Amino acid sequence: MKKLSSLFLLFLGVLTLNQSCQSKTNSYLNNKTQVEPDQACIDHVLLVDSQLGKIRNEMCEKLSLSFTIDYYTQKLESLPFEDCPITFKEAFLNHIEAWKKAKSVTDDYPKLRGEMHVLFDKIYLTPDSTTFKKLVDDIWSTWSEVENTSKVSVKTEDINP
């Protein structure tokens, strides 16, 4: 019963996040003419990514890391990139792909639960550590490219993978 309650609360949190992201998307669509469309698009994508990242980091306390990565990347792929500069869009899509590739290791640990960074530390102690470290390094390097193409300064503590 306790597990069911926890899953229900997590579900409510995800629904709330969906509403928040939809609200941010509507706000972006309504206000993009007030700022350069490409910068408004970048700002919107980074804002939603930051919100999703916070949920992602905690979601795997109740659900598998691979499920969490799937949820996170699917939400990111659904963002409106059409007004973003092509270099930013390509960098961000590469970042999404880097996250998906991490599942080649996380799929082997479906029962691990905990905050995402704690789970990463646990996987670093397994025989998969070398492979996983390379995959996480790729997440970081693709994020660096996102930052380089974004024209804005982003606090790394807001988006730690």
Image (tube, grey):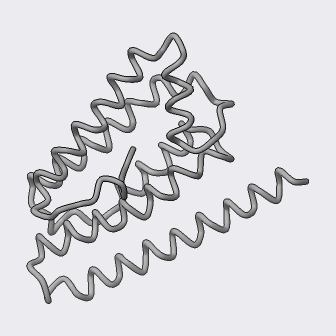
Would residue 128 be found to the left or right of residue 63 on screen?
A: left
Q: How many marks?
A: 0
* The C terminus, quarter of image: top left
Would residue 154 be found to the left or right of residue 86 on screen?
A: right
- The location of residue 57, given as percent across then percent down, is 51, 50
Find the residue positioned furthest to the right.
1
- The location of residue 118, given as percent across then percent down, is 55, 37
- The location of residue 123, given as percent across then percent down, is 53, 24
Find the residue positioned furthest to the top.
127
Q: 22 above or below 102?
A: below
Would residue 36 be found to the left or right of residue 142 on screen?
A: left
Which quadrant of the figure has residue 22? Answer: bottom left
Say which of 85 and 134 sits in front.
134
Residue at the image position 27 percent from the left and 43 percent from the top? 95
Say which of 157 and 94 sits in front.
157
Residue at the image position 37 percent from the left and 23 percent from the top? 133
Residue at the image position 56 percent from the left and 34 percent from the top? 119
Q: 112 above or below 82?
A: above
Say which of 157 and 114 sits in front.
157
Q: 65 above or below 121?
A: below
* The N terminus, quarter of image: bottom right
- The location of residue 150, given as percent across then percent down, is 14, 59
Would residue 6 be found to the left or right of residue 150 on screen?
A: right
Residue at the image position 9 percent from the left and 62 percent from the top? 151
